Amino acid sequence: MPIIRSPRQHSWLLWGLALLALAVWGRPLIQSTQFENHFFGLFYYSILAGLALFWALPSEQRLIAGHFQRRTLLLGLLPIRTVSAPVSAFREIRLEQDPNLFRRDTVWLMICGEPDNPEQVARFAFAHWPASARNIVAASQLQTELAAATGLSIVRAEDAAAE
């Protein structure tokens, strides 16, 4: 049963610690007696609260009982929302690479289905990584593992370019 969980990554914990440090760092803005500092403190902490909300609701993608599931978890523990799609709705597993302007490209492990109309194809993003050689190998291994578990075909980048 392949599972990809954001809370298991070290970066998720580091982001939580960084948010906590930013909250402590901004305390002088709200403890000041000047109105301008209170205004900037409100702005600062409202942005920080939005970031904390996104941090507190990580997701996990998994294959379980013939269904692909994406679950949103509160603090990585308590499931809040589950989106599920049967394996039979899909036909292939692809590795796609998106170019990024300011950082390393991103590799996506996509589960693709039959197009209902020519403009739209059912897709399920199972996982993504920064495009390093090590991460591309890990993505290929997970792609092979998912193909073995589901019976879906693997589409390589060379095959997709030939289409």
Image (spheres, helix red, strand yellow):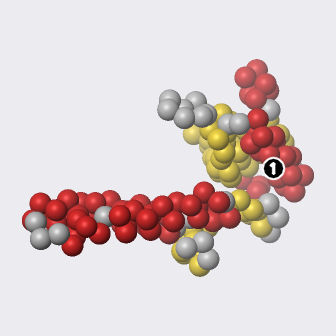
State whether residue 138 is above or below residue 62.
above
Q: Where in the figure is residue 116, as x and y percent of width and height? A: 62, 43
Outermost residue toward the left? 35
Q: Could you say which is closer to the camera, residue 127 or residue 68?
A: 127
> Residue at 80% across / 32% down in the picture?
156
Q: Could you say which is closer to the camera, residue 42 or residue 125?
A: 42
Q: Quadrant of residue 118?
A: top right
Q: Where in the figure is residue 142, as x and y percent of width and height? A: 81, 50
Q: Could you say which is closer to the camera, residue 98 or residue 134?
A: 134
Q: Where in the figure is residue 25, as x and y percent of width and height? A: 35, 64
Amino acid, disc 1: Leu
- Which of the image's four quarters has the N terminus? bottom right
Q: Where in the figure is residue 23, as x and y percent of width and height? A: 37, 67
Outermost residue toward the top? 162
Q: Quadrant of residue 9?
A: bottom right
Say which residue label 1 marks: 142
On screen, residue 105 versus residue 52, left or right, reads right
> Residue at 65% across / 34% down in the picture?
97
> Residue at 22% across / 70% down in the picture?
30
* Secondary structure of the residue carrying numbered label 1: helix
- Which of the image's four quarters has the C terminus? top right
> Residue at 80% across / 46% down in the picture?
138
Q: Quadrant of residue 134?
A: top right
On screen, residue 20 versus residue 100, left or right, reads left
